[in-house]
Image (cartoon, coloured by chain):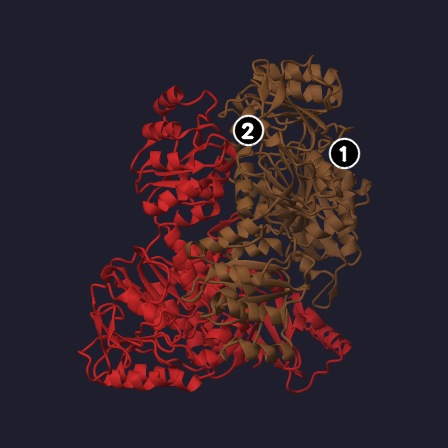
Chain colours: A brown, B red
């Protein structure tokens, strides 16, 4: 498409373009707005500037004719000869800061905009952000703020830059991209002027785009009152045993189904569906080849929720059965979790329908993961740090129920305060972003599959495409999620966000300094000690104590000294870290006991073997603790 | 200083400036190189462009007079009225990519250059690197490569960009900055042209600069054959006891000194110096007030090394005694470590002159830390992961011996392969950079004191200034050190750097994907399975195994299956990670035992409580292991 045709499309959506005239290659040029720019418009040329196809700063009619001859000459020097399909465009020269806007059609996120600093250095500087075509004003601004060029707004070196112009222009491009059959476009530069942005150089590639259908769910996944476990068994090495064991102490009604067994954990085992009382939820841990038929039969009887533990679907090449699962879900309006998953957990009903080995502590974080093994590892780590969960959803292959469904479902659950997600590949980017956007609960996401080698590995075990890491990170952040860089961070949540001020009591200055950096970088204030508090501390601490927060109570600090300092400084509305390093006199267990169990007191015992007894104590007392400094950032 | 005076200084050092003429404010302008630029030169104006004091693209003598009138008018509109001190400069208009070079005089690093992308967006884009005035060509390039603008070299969009011009220009500015009494300067833009860089707009602030003296050391810190511990005691709560206990099993000759004690650990205790046999090293753990005199007396008797454990110096306001220590060190040409430190350790002599609680394992990493408590915590963590050290130096307040000395000393030690540093504040930046530059061993640095609150905390406990984190990071990296972002990373070192390829055997796809990202991001290749290997694996693994590296041997993998896969795939020249997550059938201890102890097999057991027995086994067998994925990056 030639530039002036592009200009016409842009104008249709209210996007400004420079005043311009188009001239056939052999016609004289007449123009009346100087300074002007003359450019060649030819399908034979991609980067006009690189071949001398653009001359700027043309000041008069005479210069214009000279410039045309110069361009013709330049192109010939590059071996390009013009013909009757080519045109000259003469346009007014627009001056101002150079921006860029582009659009791409992505396999996961469909239409996505890129916006940021423009100019010839675009590819080098990459000062660009991703913006979804459904992003609202807040989201547009949040995304734009991640660029450096955004810092010239609202004012830079005496000149005003209006953020409204950014929003207005992006909205127009969102509209354009969603309405037209455009596969890709680029505007560079998009020039900021006092009257708004003007698209100066633009390129559009047309193409058809598929639209995904959005399915509405009528039933809640966690509406589980009567549950049957298909494949429950007394063989300890089987997942059906582990699930039955984890599930049978639940407050919900649990039935076991297995044609070859009479009793399990003191409960009757049903032989088949016909014997079974009515259920709302089926957990399925039987060989893959029987799964589809079982689900169909149960769905016909009104079962609404299916947790498919069984493996042997898309991840091992069995695409057909996996597609049947998707179809069944739509046909019967049911929820299917998995296949190839670890199960689900719901603290409020003490309902553990997973085959996780580790006991799951109740808590306020919902953990959602595509990988069952990552879940298992995170549960293991969480339990050992006294961290619990309100809900767990192992998504597995995501034949039906996906991230968007999980986020929506969890938003209706009071016990869930935070939603932590481990993602490998997404399917429907738009519904994922919509769910994040609507979520009233904070969402933390770790995404694997950054490198092509890992994308390949991820694909081979769930059959889902990983997509561009940068795009996912950018769009998720703009929609309102927080991206985590370390998988271990998913067991934490910013549960102390409401605390504005932090106090550190430490037996060492160095670690106190490091923790101060971490606290302040998370936007917290260091609590300022009052004169009265300093006076009181002077009476119980050695004279060399730091007289400042972090309160360094010196390397030979005993439990008693920690307690004395804490007694003076304790306040319910500040967050208090009790920092200990293994020094000569440090008795970790005694300190652990002395500081007591309070919600706003968090022990950070920086060490390992020397603190084993203390750690055991914290686990036993279910006290959240840290054995490193870095992870503390995750709870602030 | 007016711009043309600045031009004269630049020209003295061979730095190109545009052809220019200076005109008194009331004289006619004559110029013969068009297009030209006309600018005002006035002490009353800082940002000329912002007040209309610059007009570019002047094409003729007539336009030049018009432009002068326009500038005068513009300035009046901003309330600036010219007088006889002001001048007009007319210069040829230089076109090309805009760069920036600046110089600042820093309290720690003295003269430092900043170089990168120039133009009006400088402060917004901050695409700038730090370059030391003593950086050589390699260092200049390494630093420059951290900027985005460097990516246009050696060629961008058909235009050649010569890196030699960068080096040449920076060398000239290094020379200028070191030779002249300049406190600060700015050149923006410094324009890249086909003939090299041309400094177009320049500003210089003059000022005197102090020079630090550099002291030469004649003695090695680790030359310890006969050692006396002053303050050795049988009181278990005292550091003098812990040091004596750690030290007395050394291969070196250890003497204890304490006027109130006869015997300790079966050794005679000396009452005073006069009784004591000749020594080369003194460890001092007596009250601060006696330290200075003791050192002076011992130095007079020829003792060369002093490890001052005692606290109570600068960190608690006693600046005077700390300064005496510095003076004594210079006067007697002795090494003083500390004061206020944990001590030193030397694996080759089994010499532990620290009061660390944890046993230190021998190894190949030298750990250098300003904070004794950070050392203690890191030793504790290292030991629990079977990681050992060749040397440990606790620098404490650094009255004398500092980071540069430590790096130099450790470079002469064969047993030390890596130098890991925890730094709070530096004293002499130039000698620190010189030591990094000269080091033949890799250096890893963690620097605390990023935020102003943490700088304050650091200062209050060692009395040293933290300085700018960004500058330290930039300069250290350019000089050849690696900056670590997490304090725990200091117990690791890139000990598997020589391995180009990595194999992952895992019982789970998700964690395998995450580890693949980590491995590939560290520049390693994933080992490619041969057809023969795949055939053999097909015989021992379930059919759903991944058929790819990571070799996913499926969630129900037993120790036997791990061993079978490893037996087929083991090669001495690839690095092998045995990745396990706590799944239903996972027996961590059995897997730990099955995989054996080989230097290139590293267990990564991603979990916590479920793997306690395995971890105990690894510790007992002194096998390096991981219980998380993220830290694996540190050994690659």
Frontmost residue, B195 versus A25: B195
Q: 10 Å neighbourhood of mark 2: few (<14), some, or many (≥20)?
A: many
Residue A46 in the figure: left or right of residue A333: left
**Please, is residue B372 above or below residue A370 in the view?**
below
Q: Residue furthest left?
A: B277
Q: Which x, y percent locates residue B344?
A: 32, 67
Frontmost residue, A620 versus B622: A620
Structural distance between the alpha carbons of marks 1 and 2:
53 Å
Frontmost residue, B253 versus B499: B253
**Which element type, helix, strand or loop, lies under badge 1?**
loop
Residue A162 in the figure: left or right of residue A502: right
Residue B91 sits in which quadrant?
A: bottom right
Q: Which mark is residue A180?
A: 1
The answer to whether any part of residue A179 appears in the image is: yes
Frontmost residue, B300 versus A97: B300
Residue that numbered label 2 is attached to:
A242
Q: Which x, y percent locates residue A366?
A: 65, 41
Number of labelled discs?
Answer: 2
**Please, is residue A481 above or below residue B536 in the view?**
below
**Please, is residue A352 above or below residue B541 in the view?**
below
Q: 10 Å neighbourhood of mark 1: few (<14), some, or many (≥20)?
A: few
| Sequence-earlier tag: 1 or 2 | 1
């Amino acid at each position: 498409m030639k530039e002036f045709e592009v200009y016409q499309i842009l104008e249709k959506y209210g996007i400004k373009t420079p005043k311009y005239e188009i001239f056939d290659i052999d016609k004289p040029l007449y123009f009346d707005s100087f300074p002007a720019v003359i450019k060649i418009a030819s399908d034979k040329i991609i980067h006009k500037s690189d071949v001398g196809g653009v001359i700027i700063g043309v000041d008069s009619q005479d210069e214009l004719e000279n410039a045309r001859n110069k361009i013709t000459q330049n192109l010939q020097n590059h071996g390009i000869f013009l013909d009757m399909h080519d045109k000259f465009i003469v346009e007014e020269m627009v001056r101002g800061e150079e921006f860029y806007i582009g659009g791409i059609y992505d396999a996961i996120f469909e239409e996505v905009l890129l916006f940021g600093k423009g100019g010839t250095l675009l590819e080098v500087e990459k000062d660009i952000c991703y913006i979804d075509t459904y992003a609202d004003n807040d989201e547009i601004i949040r995304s734009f703020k991640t660029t450096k060029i955004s810092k010239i707004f609202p004012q830079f070196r005496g000149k005003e830059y209006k953020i409204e112009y950014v929003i207005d222009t992006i909205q127009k491009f969102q509209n354009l991209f969603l309405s037209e059959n455009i596969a890709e476009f680029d505007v560079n530069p998009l020039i900021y002027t006092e009257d708004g942005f003007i698209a100066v150089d633009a390129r559009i590639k047309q193409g058809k785009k598929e639209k995904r259908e959005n399915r509405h769910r009528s039933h809640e996944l966690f509406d589980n009152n009567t549950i049957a476990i298909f494949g429950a068994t007394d063989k300890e090495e089987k997942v059906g045993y582990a699930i039955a064991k984890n599930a049978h102490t639940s407050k919900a009604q649990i039935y076991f189904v297995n044609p070859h067994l009479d009793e399990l954990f003191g409960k009757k085992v049903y032989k088949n569906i016909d014997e079974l009382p009515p259920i709302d939820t089926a957990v399925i841990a039987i060989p893959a080849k029987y799964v589809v038929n079982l689900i169909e039969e149960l769905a016909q009887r009104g079962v609404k929720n299916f947790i498919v533990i069984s493996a042997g679907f898309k991840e091992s090449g069995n695409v057909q059965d996996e597609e049947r699962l998707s179809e069944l879900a739509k046909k019967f309006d049911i929820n299917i979790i998995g296949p190839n998953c670890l199960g689900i957990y719901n603290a409020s009903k003490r309902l553990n329908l997973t085959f996780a080995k580790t006991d799951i502590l109740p808590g306020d974080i919902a953990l959602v993961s595509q990988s069952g093994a990552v879940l298992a590892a995170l549960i293991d780590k969480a339990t050992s740090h006294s961290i619990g969960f309100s809900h767990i959803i192992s998504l597995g292959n995501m034949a039906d129920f996906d991230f968007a469904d999980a986020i929506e479902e969890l938003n209706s659950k009071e016990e869930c305060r935070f939603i932590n997600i481990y993602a490998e590949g997404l399917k429907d980017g738009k519904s994922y972003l919509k769910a994040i956007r609507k979520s009233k609960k904070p969402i933390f996401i770790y995404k694997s599959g950054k490198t092509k080698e890992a994308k390949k590995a991820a694909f081979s075990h769930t059959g889902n495409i990983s997509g561009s890491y940068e795009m996912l990170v950018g769009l998720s952040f703009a929609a309102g999620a927080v991206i985590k860089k370390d998988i271990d961070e998913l067991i934490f949540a910013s549960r102390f966000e409401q605390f504005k001020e932090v106090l550190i009591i430490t037996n060492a200055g160095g670690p106190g300094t490091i923790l101060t950096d971490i606290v302040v970088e998370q936007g917290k204030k260091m609590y300022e000690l009052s004169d009265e508090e300093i006076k009181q501390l002077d009476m119980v601490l050695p004279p060399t104590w730091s007289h400042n927060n972090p309160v360094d109570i010196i390397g030979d600090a005993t439990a008693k000294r920690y307690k004395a300092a804490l007694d003076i400084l304790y306040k319910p509305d500040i967050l208090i870290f009790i920092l200990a390093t293994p020094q000569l006199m440090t008795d970790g267990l005694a300190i652990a006991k002395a500081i007591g169990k309070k919600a706003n007191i968090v022990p950070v015992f920086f060490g390992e073997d020397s603190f084993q007894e203390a750690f055991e104590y914290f686990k036993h007392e279910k006290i959240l603790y840290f054995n490193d400094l870095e992870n503390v950032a995750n709870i602030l």
